[in-house]
Structures are given as structure tokens and as C-alpha cells.
Image (cartoon, grey):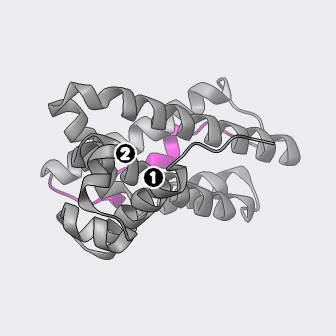
Amino acid sequence: MAHKSPGGGTRYRIMSAAAQLVADRDGGDPSVAEIAKAAGVYPNQITYHFGSKDSLMVHAAFLGLLHDAKRVEKIGWRAIDAESFRRNTSRAVMAMPSLPSVSRALAAAIARPELSEVVDTHLRLLFQQSERYLQALAAERNWRSERPLALEVRTFWSAALGATLLFRAGLNGRTSDLDLAQTLTLHD
């Protein structure tokens, strides 16, 4: 029987509430009081479990991203060939509602180096989840890649996150101006 750490449910509930509040609004982060109320906890429990609101927001942003990535996987499974997979997956990723909050989380980690370990942990989890998915899909469809799948995943997500940061920072244009599909080398 696996041992569950005390407060593990509370920690997840706080992260989920923060992620939902961010998803529900367009723009700024919710206050600690709003998050605490939505999670059914006291505000000091946020500090206890996460150390700071910024740390919580990084965790919440990546929780949203991991959930969105799972939904995008379903789009990939429906692709009839590698070309439609590349195109449809790229479009879906660039439209994920969690990307703006992840770009804010990345910016926060740049400004506060103590958050870089949190970002690194979540990025490794995203890369692992995506690589397992691509391995299963490529094996089932007998698709090939011009580079190792681990590199394929890192290149794809780096381009998607980098583009989001650029557009959020004020680059003129739209995400549709980026051909993210070309970062993928999967083929039939």
C-alpha cells in the first residue's frame, strides 16, 4: 500500500483551484484569498504548502498544461497520417488555454531563480509524458522520426513555449504566424 503524505490532498486541491481560477479569467492571477476560498483552505496553507504565491502559480500553470497536453493527445490519436498529426497537434497546442499562464510562470522563474527547480521538474514531467505518448503513437502507426523522440519532444515544446513567451511579450502577429508543425519530423 502506498503511503500518502499528509496534506497531499490539500496541496493538490490548492493547485487545482488556482489552475481553475486562472483558466476562468483572462489576464491576471487570482489573489491568495480567492485561491484559498476556492480550495476551501486558509490563506496561510498556501504558504505552508508552496512557500509563496509565485511557487503555487508555477505549479498551477503546469498542472493546467499537463491536463491540456492530455486533451491534445486525443487529437493526435485521431490523425489519419503523420502530416495531419503534425498540423492538428500543432494547432491544438498553440490554442491551449494554459499557455498564457505557463508563459507567466516561465517569466516568474526567470525573475525568481528559486522557482527554476519547480519549472525544471514540471518540464521534465511534460517531456516524459509527451515522449511516452509519441512512442506509443509512432509504434502503433509505424511512423518514423528523423531524430530521437526525446529530442523531438523537447524541440516541439521549446518552440511552442518560446513562441508563447514572444507573443505574450508583445511580438506583433498571431500564433498562426508560426509553423510549429515543421518542428516535428514524424513521417509515415
Alpha-carbon neighbours of circle 1 within 10 Å: few (<14), some, or many (≥20)? some
Closer to us: 93 or 143: 93
Picture layout, residue 32 above or below residue 112: below
Q: Nearer the viewer, residue 10 or 165?
A: 10
Is 161 situated above or below 36?
A: above
Q: Which label was assigned to residue 11?
A: 1
Left or right: 56 in relation to 160? left
Residue 14: percent from left, percent from top = 40, 59
Q: Is disc 2 in contact with disc 1, using a CB cutoff of under 8 Å?
A: yes
Mark 1 residue element: helix
Q: Which residue matches tag 2?
A: 49
Location of residue 76 (image quadrant): bottom right
Residue at position x 37%, y 53% in the image? 61
**Circle 2: residue type:** His
Closer to the chain start, of discs 2 and 1, is: 1
Question: How many numbered discs?
Answer: 2
